[in-house]
Amino acid sequence: MIRPRPGCRVTKDVEGIPYGVALGTEKEERIRLEVALGGATRTRRGAGSCGVPSSDAILTLPFHDIGEVKMPTRRGTEAPKVYINGIGAYLPDHLVSNDTVAKLTGIDPLWIQKRTGITRRYLSKATERTSQLASRAVREALAQADLAPGEVDLLLVSSAFPDSFPPRSTAEVVRHKLGLVNAHVVDVNTPLSGFLYALKFARDTVASGSVRNALVVGAESFSAASDLNDRRICYLFSDGSGAVVMSQKKGFAVVGPVAVGSSAKPGHVHWCESSDNDRESFTLYGSTVTGLEQYFHAALETLLGNAKLSTTLHVLSQQVSQRALELSPRPGVQVFDGFTDCAYLLSASLPVSLYHLLRWGEAKEREKAMLFSTDGLGAWCGCLVDLLQTPPWSSTSPRPLQSIARW
C-alpha cells in the first residue's frame, strides 16, 4: 500500500484509481503522472533538493504547477477548445521572378514553370537568418494576441534551415531575441510537415491545461544557407516566416485535432529530370502530382469523413492545386491560390497562407480552413481550423497583385 507523507494527498479519478502522488513513500514506490506533453515536463519542488528527483517517489508536473491536475479527456466528455488568438507573417521585400533566375543560372523560365508551377520566390538579404525572420512574425502575432513576451509558456519553431551549421537551437535564439523568459523551447526540423507536427504538440499541450499560451512558428531562410548558383535547387525554395499564438482563451479561430497518417506506397527520394505527361510533372522529393493528390484526399477523408459541408472549406497547401479536387469533388471545397505559384516556403508555408487568407478577408465567419502537408513519400498531416469571426485587422480590399522587385 502506498502511504503519502503528512501534508501530501493522493487524488483519485472516477474509477478510484490514484493518479495524484505523494512526494515520498515508505517503500520507495514511485507514481509517475503521465501527462500528454511528449516528454516536456518539470519536476515539482519538493521531490528532492531544489526540485531535483530523490530516491523517493516523485511527481512529474507540467510547466506550471496549476494545483488541480487535468487528466486526458475521457470518453463522453468534450475536450477543451484551443483557440488562435494571434497570427503573424513576414515575407522579404525581394520578390524574384523566373526571368531573374534565368539571368543568373541560364535555366529557361518556362521550363521552371512547366515542371514546378513556380513563377516567383521571396529571398531575404544575405545577412538575414531564420531566427530574424521568425522574430518578425512572432512580434506581430504577440501584438494581435495582446500578449507580453513573458506570458508565453511554450515556443516551438519548425525550420529546415537553422541559423548556422552545425545547427544551434533556432527556438532558443528566438527566445533570447524577444525576451520570452518563461518559454520552454522545442525545435522541429521536418521540412514540409514540421509546422503541423509542432501545431499538434502545442494544441495537445494547451488542451491538457499544462501551459496557458503556446507559440508555434514556421520559418525558413533558404537563401542564407544555400548556394543560389546551384541549378538543381536555386529556383525551388523561398524565404519567409509565420507564427500562431494558441491558448484556451477565446480567440477568432478554433484549432481542430491534427490528423497524421500514411498512405500509398513509399517512393524513392530523387529529383525527377523530365516528363512529357503534365499530370506526372515534378514535385518536391520526387513524388508525382497524382501521388500528392492521393495523399490529400486521404487526409480530407480522415478529417471530414462522409460529413457534408455546410460552409466553404479553404484548402491551404502549396502542394495541392485546384485540380486535385477533380478526383473526388466535394461541394464547397476550394484551394487558396495565394501561394500556389510561389517557390516552396516549407515550414512557413501554412502559417503564411493562413495569415494571408485572413488578412485579405477571403475567409468569412463560420467558414473552415484545412491545413495540409506531405513529405511526398506517403506520410501526410492535416488539420481543420474553424473561423469564428473575421479578425479586426482583416482588410475589405481585394488581395493586391505582387510587384516584382528588381535586384
Image (tube, rainbow, N blue to C red):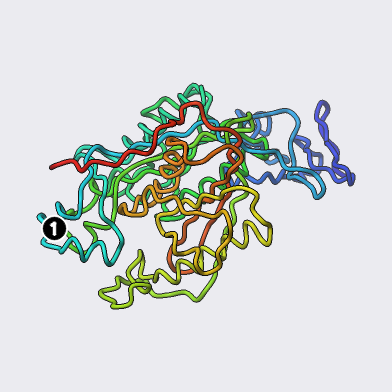
The x and y percentages for residue 128 are 24, 37
Q: What's under tag 1, amino acid-wise?
A: Ala
Q: Is residue 367 above or below residue 148?
A: below
The x and y percentages for residue 304 are 64, 57
Q: Is residue 278 above or below residue 109?
A: below
Task: Name the residue rendered at 59%, 51% in the picture.
Answer: 258
Task: Name the residue rendered at 33%, 54% in the picture.
Answer: 344
What residue does disc 1 label? 102
Image side of residue 19 versus residue 282, left or right: right
The x and y percentages for residue 190 are 43, 55
Image side of residue 65 versus residue 330, left or right: right
Q: Residues within 10 Å of mark 1 (few under 14, many from 20)?
A: some
Q: Quadrant of residue 26?
A: top right
Image side of residue 109 versus residue 361, left or right: left
Depth check, front residue: 2 or 191: 191
Which part of the image, by quadrant, shows the C terminus?
top left
